[in-house]
Image (spheres, rainbow, N blue to C red):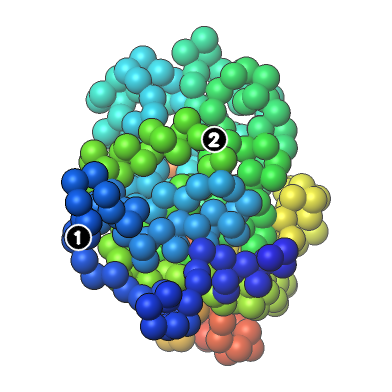
Amino acid sequence: MKGFATKAIHAGQEPDPGTGAIMTPVFLTSTYVQEELGRNKGYEYSRVSNPTRTALEQNVAALEGGTDGLAFGSGTAAVDALFHLLAPGDHVVMSQNVYGGTYRIAKMIWEVYGLKFSFVDTTDVKNIEKAILPATRMLFIETPTNPTIEITDLAACASLAKRRGILSVADNTFATPYLQQPLSFGIDIVVHSLTKYLNGHSDMLGGLVVTSNAGVTERLRFMQKAVGGILSPFDSWLCLRGTKTLAVRMKQHCENADAVARWLAGRKGIDRVLFPGLESHPGHALAKRQMRGFGGMISFELGSLAAAAAFLRNVRLCALAESLGGVESIITHPASMTHAAVPPEERKRIGVTDGMVRISVGLEDADDIIRDLDAALHAAGI
Ligand SMILES: Cc1ncc(COP(=O)(O)O)c(C=O)c1O
């Protein structure tokens, strides 16, 4: 299997040997009958492993070009599992505008248990180099970032991390493996919120880690078994259904977002449009090099909280909601929603303003999305 779309449909999935069912069954079972002491068919207890979860883990691992996948109950549970690889006193260098929930785990949970974090602008690799300390054990980047849509150089980060002997992690939720494969640039670990594009239908929560590092896999399999924050069989099945159409969905997300971004950039009253597909975006050339498309996420600036609130009150087709990556267009106010856990002064430092709005451009007709945005801007007096 070579092509991405072929892998998306088939990797990790064989017709059911008992019935020929083409779809992987939902194995709703907690345990597995053993033939005799110490003999089983590869499954013992569903916290440790479950065939539906295994199919999803292998499917996403194949899409990312990694050896192993490990599915967790949410994206944040997957991120959290990665910090269990570290020990008190260890230091992590992190992209300064990671998802607010990732920031929250770092600051409010792991710092209490003795990990240390530096949040830096990873769009310039020199900032990462400067932040590395003798105790640094992990570099954690997000590209494109949420919600400022900044691009970080995956190859440069991977080679710096290798040189300095630290584990590199990329949150690939925004791009998906269809648009970029961090492991192919030398990154050690990819983490996903499955909740977004990989599932794609806003009907489950999940997280997944992919790696080809056998030591990391062994530790994380132990975490799944010991801590148990695993993905359920039904949610695994829902996500498997989603990954089958990832290639076609991402192509259309990219096409629609490009149309919306170009329209926004030409619309009066919009101060700044952040979309890597725009030639004016500072990360445009890098995104062109390391991604096969520019994704479906756009942030733009309306100048004030009042303007953003008035606009968001008037959208009709686009849903005012948390989350992203579903077939429907979703609009978010990062400062008060996804990034509410980030203190105001830190939000200011990283450019998450009160007037910023983020849109996950869905798969509706682009003209309908644009009409809705235009009508909401007019109604808000913009
Ligand atoms: C980039 C990114 N990583 C991780 C997460 C956390 O995922 P979940 O909501 O599935 O826990 C999110 C959620 O919005 C996200 O946007």
| Quadrant where the N terminus is found in the figure | bottom right
| Residue pointed to by mark 2 | 213
Earlier residue among tags 1 and 2: 1
| Residue 104 x/y as whole percent | 33, 40
Q: Considering the numbered disc 2 on the image, is that residue within a helix, a strand or a loop?
A: loop
Q: Is residue 299 found left or right of 278 in the rendered image?
A: left
**Residue located farthest toward the top when viewing the structure as drawn:** 134
> In the image, what residue type sits under mark 1?
Val
For the point 42% across and 83% down, the residue is: 21
Q: 2 above or below 171? A: below
Q: 7 above or below 319? A: above
Examine the rendering and report whether any part of residue 65 can be seen: yes
Say the numbered circle drawn on residue 33.
1
Say the numbered circle drawn on residue 220.
none
Q: CA distance from mark 1 to mark 2?
A: 32 Å
Which of the two residues, 349 or 45, is positioned nearer the viewer here?
45
Which of the two residues, 186 or 129, is positioned nearer the viewer here?
186
Please name which of the two marks, 1 or 2, marks the residue nearer to the observer. 1
Q: Is residue 47 found left or right of 217 in the rendered image?
A: left
Examine the rendering and report whether any part of residue 355 can be seen: no
For the point 44% across and 63% down, the residue is: 55
Which of the two residues, 46 or 206, is positioned nearer the viewer here?
46
| Residue 76 x/y as whole percent | 35, 48
